[in-house]
Amino acid sequence: MRDEEAHVGRSLVAFLGGPEHAQFEPGDDPPDLVFFLDGDRVGVEVTRLSQFTIRPDGTLGNRTTDDSFGLRAVDELNAKFGSALPDDVDLFIHVEMPAQSGGKFKSKLTAWVQEIVASPAVGREEERVIEGASVRIRAINRRKSEKRIVGLIGNGYSSPDVGLNALLLLEDRIATKNEICSGLPRPVWLALLNDYWLADADSYQLAMGKLPIQHCFKRIFLVRDDGHVSELRSEA
């Protein structure tokens, strides 16, 4: 059982009245979990809601994947060059993802940072476009942190429209999981672990009302990282 599945299981148990009314165990994947509710058996499928990016050609990317790549690249630069910086200087790197080629991006960025580390006067600032990603590097005054090279990751293909993002996320996850779970014994529930924190339960409920798709899920739940659970009403 994955950590996120265990988290969803514990959160739903609390939402459903506690362990005296609800228990769960790993499922056969699918479903991810099996709940026992006062003697009744329910399959529960778990999935994450992570913000999409919309590419120029209309295809969808994953914001979390892009951000994770950028953050890992900055962490690797800190591990490689952080100790070589003077005691009074840190580096701040702002990256607008995505990059067209991850390997080439990291190689070119590493070479550029190496150049700056050789002469990192406070206030020095440079900008470049590397493999389609806009990057800005600035030498800043030393901060009270062990990390000497830090970063901020943006995404030029992410939409600021929270309602649209919520709608796209629900449509994709419900349709994908319905295809996987439609042949399972009923009832089946869907638990959505929300990584897109800009959208709350009200945002997803509004989006749910605009979805025309049919699905097999008797109940759909939105689960936050803090364990809070909301049920999304569905007309399907």
Image (tube, grey):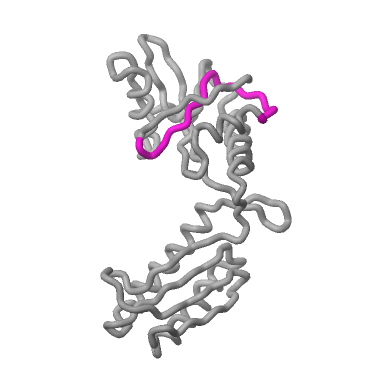
Q: Position of residue 218 (x, y in %)?
A: 54, 18
| Rendered residue at 58%/39% (across/down) | 166
| Rendered residue at 62%/19% (across/down) | 235
* Residue 101 shown left or right of residue 42 in the figure: right
Relative to 13, residue 128 above or below:
below
Name which quarter of the figure residue 208 lies in. Answer: top right
* Residue 140 shown left or right of residue 199 in the figure: left
Name which quarter of the figure residue 84 lies in. Answer: bottom left
Question: How many circles with numbers are drawn on the protein?
Answer: 0
Relative to 18, residue 38 above or below:
above
| Rendered residue at 35%/39% (across/down) | 3
Q: Position of residue 28 (x, y in %)?
A: 44, 28
Q: Is residue 74 magenta?
A: no
Relative to 123, residue 215 above or below:
above
Viewport quadrant of the C terminus: top right
Q: Magenta segment, principal secondary structure?
A: loop
Q: Position of residue 42 (x, y in %)?
A: 45, 18
| Rendered residue at 50%/32% (across/down) | 201
Q: Is residue 213 magenta?
A: yes
Q: Which residues are magenta?
A: 210-226
Q: Residue furthest bottom?
A: 119
Relative to 142, residue 208 above or below:
above
Viewport quadrant of the N terminus: top left
Q: Position of residue 97 (x, y in %)?
A: 56, 63
Q: Residue furthest right?
A: 57
